[in-house]
DNA sequence: TGGTATCGATACTTGAGGTAGCGAAACTGG
DNA sequence: CCAGTTTCGCTACCTCAAGTATCGATACCA
């Protein structure tokens, strides 16, 4: 609960009494990504993020219950909706893979993603937030677009995201174009899409 | 440096002066896995592991410079050499995939693996240890057995390990047999192995 | 003008990684 | 048996980061 973030002021109706919140969410998100990019996830403390955003630490904790929730919201903002405008199944899957690979390559995004995911390993509550708020929307969208059963879509996500994050985590560098292409060549045929390659 | 661990007492020659170390490495490894299995990686503090092993915390820090190094040695001990006795390329790859999947399913092993990997995301030094001591031996063995160039072997590892760990991290449960089979069906043909499936 | 909720600032609590220093114990060589 | 060396368990400590509490000031509404 308490997640009314990412709502534009115009969308909110019937303003409650009291001093309204200042519109610093976007600033905090930007500060989060740049700080994580600069120092890594663990060393990007909430103190530092607050300082980079020009905001008090207490303000951040008033809006997000934990560092993990902040980063999840930050990633939701950074990812946005998945573009699913391909014509056939193959193009659709390939574009989804290339889209997530590109997002993970953006400065700060991959580190933040790998970082929260890391914390989630030993934090069931954060794992729940991650699954429900970040994974679920994309799972639903892919299910709709591909017509694959849920289990297959989850497997697809595990393979694509897992591979990209493992490479980033082991090397510190996002996967290069050629390897992303190999990923597409490997995954798409398995899911019944024709890549048109030899 | 300082990594003479995992050496059997009989292997060491010309005993140095002073009190010899007690043979508690195996006990500490077992305590590490069971504690991680019980509480998760982050809540499995060195204090708790030491208590579970019936050993002082300082003893652990005398043998391993950090929690990460302890867990890496623990995983080395848990994994052991990869069994590469398949006849053809396909059997070889499939057995390697099923072997690592089975290991990750063992209580504590998967959590410990995902946990150190997590820490490595924002700790370059730990990443170095992980790559050199844990990944490199298996990379070399696979390179030898499969004859694939290094880049392809690293890609293979990213896909297999990344997928398995992502599933474990998101759900808290290791991947089931059927999904491991799907992983084999997807990966092996991509690397030029014949699965013999339809 | 009063009610309400946010803001920044400071101080604090809690927990975990890691270190320092102690006396006691266990081994070696003389 | 004894001196030298090293590990042992123990206690106390340091550092750093997540998260909490409180307070006066500020911005909005009715």
Image (tube, coloured by chain):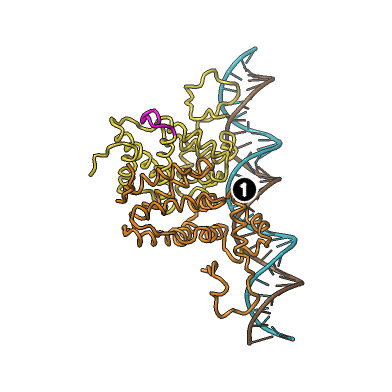
Chain colours: A orange, B yellow, C cyan, D brown
Is residue B121 magenta-colored?
Answer: no
Residue at the (54%, 46%) spot, across then down: B45
Please name whichever residue, A89 or A54, is drawn nearer the observer in this view of the structure. Answer: A89
Residue at the (30%, 45%) spot, across then down: B181
Figure check: B190 above or below A54 = above
Chain for disc number 1: A
Which secondary structure is most common in the magenta stretch?
helix
Q: Name the residue under label 1.
A: A39
Residue A146, position in %: x, y? 34, 58
Q: Secondary structure beneath disc 1?
A: helix
Figure check: B77 above or below A5 = above
B55 vs A56, left or right, is left
Residue at the (42%, 61%) spot, across then down: A136
- The 10 Å Cα crowd at callout 1, few under 14, some 14 to 19, many 20 or more, is some
Is residue B149 magenta-colored?
Answer: yes
Please name whichever residue, A32 or B21, is drawn nearer the observer in this view of the structure. Answer: A32
């Amino acid at each position: 609960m308490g997640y009314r973030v990412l709502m534009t002021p115009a969308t909110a109706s019937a303003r409650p009494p009291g001093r309204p919140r200042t519109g610093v969410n976007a600033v905090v998100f930007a500060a989060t990504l740049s700080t994580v990019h600069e120092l890594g996830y663990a060393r990007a403390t909430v103190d530092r993020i607050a300082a980079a955003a020009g905001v008090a630490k207490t303000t951040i904790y008033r809006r997000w219950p934990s560092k993990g929730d902040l980063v999840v919201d930050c990633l939701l903002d950074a990812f946005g909706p998945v573009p699913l405008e391909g014509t056939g199944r193959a193009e659709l899957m390939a574009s989804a893979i290339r889209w997530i690979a590109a997002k993970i390559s953006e400065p700060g995004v991959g580190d933040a993603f790998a970082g929260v995911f890391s914390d989630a390993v030993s934090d069931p509550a954060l794992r729940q937030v991650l699954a429900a708020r970040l994974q679920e929307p994309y799972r639903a969208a892919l299910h709709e677009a591909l017509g694959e059963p849920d289990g297959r879509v989850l497997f697809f996500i595990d393979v694509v995201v897992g591979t990209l994050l493992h490479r980033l985590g082991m090397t510190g560098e996002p996967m290069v174009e050629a390897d992303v292409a190999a990923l597409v060549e490997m995954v798409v045929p398995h899911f019944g899409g024709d890549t048109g390659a030899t």
